[in-house]
Each structure stands twice: as structure tokens, then as C-alpha cells.
Image (cartoon, coloured by chain):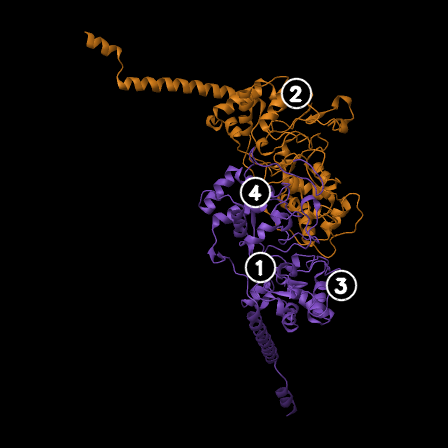
Chain colours: A purple, B orange
Amino acid sequence: MHDQASRENEMTPNAVLSSIVASSLLVAASFAHADAALRERANALFKPIPERVTEMNGEKIVEAQVQLGRKLWFDPRLSRSHLISCNNCHNLSIGGSDNVKVSVGHGWQRGPRNSPTVFNAVFNVAQFWDGRAADLKEQATGPLQAPVEMNNTPARIEATLRSIPEYVEEFTKAFGSANAVTFDNAARALAAFETTLITPNAPFDRFLKGDDNALTAEQKEGLRLFMDTGCASCHNGVNLGGQAYFPFGVVKRPGADILPENDKGRFAVTNTASDEYVFRASPLRNVALTPPYFHSGEVWDLEQAVAIMGDSQLGRELNDSEVRAITAFLHSLTGELPQIDLPILPPSSPSTPKPELDLPGQLESSD
Amino acid sequence: MHDQASRENEMTPNAVLSSIVASSLLVAASFAHADAALRERANALFKPIPERVTEMNGEKIVEAQVQLGRKLWFDPRLSRSHLISCNNCHNLSIGGSDNVKVSVGHGWQRGPRNSPTVFNAVFNVAQFWDGRAADLKEQATGPLQAPVEMNNTPARIEATLRSIPEYVEEFTKAFGSANAVTFDNAARALAAFETTLITPNAPFDRFLKGDDNALTAEQKEGLRLFMDTGCASCHNGVNLGGQAYFPFGVVKRPGADILPENDKGRFAVTNTASDEYVFRASPLRNVALTPPYFHSGEVWDLEQAVAIMGDSQLGRELNDSEVRAITAFLHSLTGELPQIDLPILPPSSPSTPKPELDLPGQLESSD
């Protein structure tokens, strides 16, 4: 019977609903399957930022050193001018960097390279763009002395710290010895503080740990491209970079504006011809917060930086939607920045060395 | 009987003790009386710092403006270079000032005067050494634009803030209107934050409120001298200064090193001959934390500054013990500095104006 037959071919409203639900579940199951596969690949290459770092170079981190390091971090008296603290170029309010092309230091001199972020630096294999410092402690001794940065000397830093009774007390407590106020211990305390400057719980970390909804569809596509096209060959590990050294221009050397000819990178560290224009692969955590990009700081736009990398490192002209997807993925690397209490610093004493503001080439007494 | 008589003239150990206690009590009573008298005189001239400021210019302070102002305070993007924030010259970690002779701003240029502390500035009758700004809001508009300080313009500051979506949202919330992102509102938010930068509960405040033990004997002697010799004629009120204008050199003009001839103080504001070398009496709260001293920043030693004031303002050569006692009293003006959470600042967007580092006299494009 026609009616019967047509009724048999028709679906009741409930059946339609069931069917939609069923196919949605199938689609969802297939998405979930795709997400699981993507997560498995990603977890083989990357690692989430841990909630806390408890050791550095195999030693337990001492809380009193962290607290002392926090004060030193913000203390401009570690610079010759008494105007520049670590936080000037590694500003903890704006991504742990300074968001200018190259850092500006003593006498408004410009440094040779863009300031790398301090956030998650503890996870890098070595410090600086060329890896010339083995660890955070060794790194800390650099800018304190660099003429274009804080322009100070170990002896003057020690004299400053020793002239401030509260610092003497805190160093003694933090390092448990007499004569604890040394340049070396100041760097050690700064490094201890820096181990707390980590940014866990980025969307990417939540995805790695199992949350399918932590990334948008475009970010997942970007992650897939990041692995498929080869970005992850250099940018992997917990920091998506920071683990090894590679030539800038693996396939094609960028123009001299982006890769200045007189900065040969790791060559200056190793004196090995094959290390010309070799740099540490940039760690990409919080990269959306730290323009401008590259050691030259010449590129402000993250999409442009991604396109340049595709061209120079992979020999591949990424199309617009690929660039956008990879950039969207990079935005998922922005983690939770630590909440910092601004320290109240112990006052100077009459014997504290006075600030010296002399500009390079000027002869001028202290003021 | 000899034994009896001698025993009558002798005092038993208990009687000796009673006598000592009695005379101690007498002495204590007399000290307490002296303290009460000193407190009564002091309370007629000075006032404790309140625990909280709830109004500014007769208007209730809005918490959302305070929180926005805290971000703006630490944001170096308010300067042309993106390197200088309010906190550079009014460092909340070191007494609300910068502890250098004169402040250093854009291009490492030196400003004309020593940076006054922001702490308790809300209690001053007007702002700057010469009182040229009526209130905190008007003051805030100065350094943002001064070529030797942050070297920015209202238009560029507004363009910067409007380019940052989170700031647009926060301004709208804080000021409850569309088009809330204005230079004027930025200054208003900064002023709102500054009303929280007060330092209550200094030993002197606790003494004023009734705690005899808050000051040492030397500090009490210093307070007495501070009133007797005439210091309090200019340095009175809640901030022990900051209320009125007086010539530097009431009695005797100091040397040109301390009082530079080309800085005529309030004369530049009023154009009145009698205002030559007239300055606002320095507020003395936390003065021990804010060397160097005077608008010229030429004197690092607080005792020396006290001696100079005695000589130039009172025509009186204070002897060493008087200088020491007054200085000890000034140390009792150091209050409890506020605990500040370092803000995490909203990131720039592609349309945020780029930092410009050009030095005066140089022509250079942005970087």
C-alpha cells in the first residue's frame, strides 16, 4: 500500500533526530580520533611546561635564594648608573622581554641583539642567542658587566651589596656562610629566582594533557603543519626550541636587514667556520608576546616571521592560510604569566658607591 | 642601742627595692609627662598619615581607575621609546624616587631637578618642586610629554592605548563611557593609583597617636629641636612640608652648587620677582629613603642637608649633636611602604605605534 510503503520509507521525527545525533557522534568520534592522533604525535615531540621547577643543575632550589634573587632582579643599583635593573630588558610585565628591536642600556647605547625572554629560560639547553652561557647563573653575569647594558664590574657590585646591611643579612641567610656577598652568589640568587619565571597551562599544554577543546580547529591545523612542514625539527621539546643550534638560512639566507652580516652568531663562541650564522633555535613559548622577532629584532609581525622561516629554513613558500594557521598555533603557546610581588628594596648606606651616569666617551665624575 | 639605731637608719633590702621602684616610677612619670607635652605640641603642628585615602578633589576614588592606573604606572609604552615608565623615576621599590642626582629620561638626557617621591604626594598642596601642577592628575601629564623624560604626545599616547583592546575595555569599565580612552583619563587613572601610594604607621605617626616608645630618646630630642629651632615653620602638616612655598636661602643663600643660579624655582610659574629661588617646602616623609637631597640633588648625606637647612633657612649653626638628633627624628618619618603586585600588561596589537628611540638631534625612523 502506497501509504504504508511511503510511511515505511519516511522517518519519524524521532528517528530523524536519532540519526542526526548518531552522525554527530560519528563525526565527533572521528574528530576525537583525529585529536588523539594529533596529540600522540605532538607528545612525541613536545612537553608541557611543568607547574613548578624544583631543581637546577641537579641541586634543589633554595627559597631564600629565590626571594633574594627577586630583590636583585628589580634592583637598579646592580647597574653602574643605578637606573637599569634586570627587569628593564626582561620586563616581567610584558612577556619577559622589552619589545624593542635591540635592548638599550647604559648611556642609551643599543645592544647588538634583541632581548630574549626570561620566561621559561630555565628549560633552554644554554643561554643567549648563541648559547654562550651554559646556564642561567652564567648568563646573569653577562648583562651586569656588558658596557652597553648595565656597565658594572663584579667588584663594584660586591661593594654595593656589602654596603647595604639588609643584603648582607639576606645573602648570609640564603647561602649559609660568612662572606656570602659575592658576585657569584648574586648571579646564583638571580638564577634561582629565574627558575620561578615559568608560564604553565598554555592552551597547547592543556591540549597535550588531553583537553581537545584547548585548541581551536585552526590551531590544530597549525600544529599539524608545524610538524608536517618541518618547523618541529628545530623547534621541539618543552620550549619548542632552545635545545640546539642551526644556521639561520638552512636553505636560503635571508636579506642582510634580517640577518646582519656582521653578526655571525655562534661562530663567535666556537670559532668554527660551520658555525657562521648559526643560532640557537628560538624557544617559541609566549612568542606572541615578544615581538619584534629574530636576533636582529627586524620583524614585528609574527605571520611575516613564520613566512620568513618557511622560506629560509624549510625552502617552502607557505601559503596565506598555512601561515595563518601556524601563527594561530603559536598563539596557543602563551601561558599563565607568574604573579610577582614588587619587592621593597633595602636602602643604600653612606658607603654605597654612588651612581655613575657617564656616557661612553665622556669623562665625568659620579652623579 | 647602737645596733638598734643603726638598724633604724639602715634600709631593709625590700625597702631599698621599694625606693628604687618608687623613684623609677617618678622618673617614668616625669618622662611620660614630658612625652605627653611633646606629643601635644607635635599634634598641633603635624598629622599622622591616614590608613587610607578615599577621596581626591572631593570625589570618591574608583577602584577600577586605581587598578587601571597601576597598569599604566608600569607601562613603558606610555613613553616614546617604550622603555621608560612612571616607575623609572618614581621607583616604588626604593622610596618612590630614583636616588640619582637628577632624573634621566629619553635618550639618557638629564632632567633639570631631582625626582620628588610619589609616596604621600596626594597630601601635598600642589605638585613639582615649584608647585606648577595643581594636583596629581595635572602632574601626571607633565613627565609623559617632557622631551627629557618620556618624550611622548597626548595623541600618540591615545593611539597607543586605543590600539590595545584590553586597555579599551578597562578604560570603558573604569570611566563608564564610550570613548573613554583619552589622555585626560589616563592621567586621572594614574592619579587614582597614586592616592594608594601612602606610607602610614611610621614611628612618628605611632608617637603622635600615643605610643611613647615609638621614638627613641634621641628622636624625641630631634623632634623638640625640629619645633624649637623653626624647621616646623615650613615643614609641618601631614607631610612635614609640601604645603607652602619659601625661598631657598631665607637667611643666607647657599652656594651655586646646591642652589644653581639658572633654576629660579617658582619664579618660572608666577613670574613674580619675589618668587625667585622660591620652592615648595620639601615634604619630609620617608626622607631617609630619598637621597640625594634638594632640587639640585647635590647633597647625599642627610645630616649635611639638615646642617645646610639650619644655616640657610634659620641662620643658625646647628651643632653636631643637634644635627644628629634632628636626623634621627627624620628617620622616624619612614613609614610602611605599600605592597604592590606587579601588573601583567595587555599585549600590543599590530596597530600599536612602534617605539622610537631617536636621540635629540638625531633624525631616525622608528625602532
Q: Position of residue B335 (x, y in %)?
A: 55, 34
Quadrant of res B190: top right
- Residue at numbered disc 4: A155
- Numbered tag placed on residue A255 in the rendering: 3
Quadrant of res A322: bottom right
* Amino acid type shown at disc 1: Ala
The quadrant of the rendering that contains the N terminus of chain A is bottom right
- Residue at numbered disc 2: B312
Q: Nearer the viewer, mark 2 or mark 1?
A: 1
| Chain to which the residue tagged by mark 3 belongs | A
Q: Secondary structure at mark 2?
A: helix
Category of crowding for the residue at label 4, using alpha-carbon neighbours closer than 10 angstroms: few (below 14), some (14–19), many (at least 20): few
Nearer to us in this view, A104 or B156:
A104
Can residue B61 be seen from the camera position used here? no
Q: Position of residue A202 (x, y in %)?
A: 58, 61
Q: Nearer the viewer, mark 3 or mark 4?
A: 4
The quadrant of the rendering that contains the C terminus of chain A is top right
Q: Secondary structure at mark 4?
A: helix
Nearer to us in this view, A212 or B15:
B15
* Amino acid type shown at disc 3: Gly
As displayed, is residue A237 above or below residue B32?
below
Q: Are marks 2 and 4 on the same chain?
A: no
Nearer to us in this view, A330 or B328:
B328
Category of crowding for the residue at label 1, using alpha-carbon neighbours closer than 10 angstroms: few (below 14), some (14–19), many (at least 20): many
